[in-house]
Amino acid sequence: YLVISNVCKGNNIRTLINAAHAYGFEIVFVGECSSQNQFIREKTSHLHFADFEELKEFLQKNSVPLVGIEIVEEARSILENPFTESIALMPGNEGTGLSKRQKLAADSFVYIPQYGDGTASLNVTVATTMVLHQFTI
């Protein structure tokens, strides 16, 4: 699954949906969305949960861990292949990363190693696509 909750820009949401489809992930939306992004949801096959508690209940019943994509101390590098057979990946917001609620809901975290010092993080769609790719190989 690819869990989209805190991503705000319509272009980013569309790109995440396209990447999820390219790598065989099912789309999951959590919470409400802005009216401008409602159109995107209506045109996309997806699961929807009102909140993270509802999402977590569904994932736990199906033995699927929720993995946040975030640069935090306890995160594991995607190069370690820290993935299970079933997974729900959750990117954060374009500017602020995962929210406190998202971090509390996550079972674990992964990050993408960076070798230069030109930026603190990658664009949400670039980072998520890299993680989706690493999971599928």
Image (tube, helix red, strand yellow):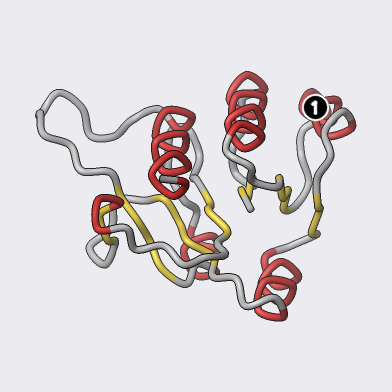
Near-viewer residue (84 or 110): 84
Near-viewer residue (99 or 11): 11
Q: Residue furthest front?
A: 137
Q: Position of residue 5 (x, y in %)?
A: 64, 47
Q: Position of residue 97 (x, y in %)?
A: 43, 44
Q: Residue at x 38, y 44 (%)?
A: 134
Q: Residue furthest top?
A: 11
Q: Residue at x 46, y 51 (%)?
A: 98
Q: Residue at x 64, y 29 (%)?
A: 13
In the rendered image of this protein, does residue 95 appear above or below residue 58? above
Residue 119 sits in quarter: top left
Residue 41 sits in quarter: top right
For disc 1, the neighbor class at 10 Å (few under 14, some 14 to 19, many from 20) is some
Which residue is under mark 1? Answer: 40
Q: Position of residue 36 (x, y in %)?
A: 79, 23
Q: Secondary structure at mark 1?
A: helix
Q: Is residue 35 left or right of residue 2?
A: right
Residue 83 sits in quarter: bottom left
In the rendered image of this protein, does residue 35 appear above or below residue 69? above
Q: Please state which amino acid type lies under the numbered disc 1.
A: Ile
Q: Residue at x 49, y 45 (%)?
A: 92
| Quarter that holds the C terminus | top left
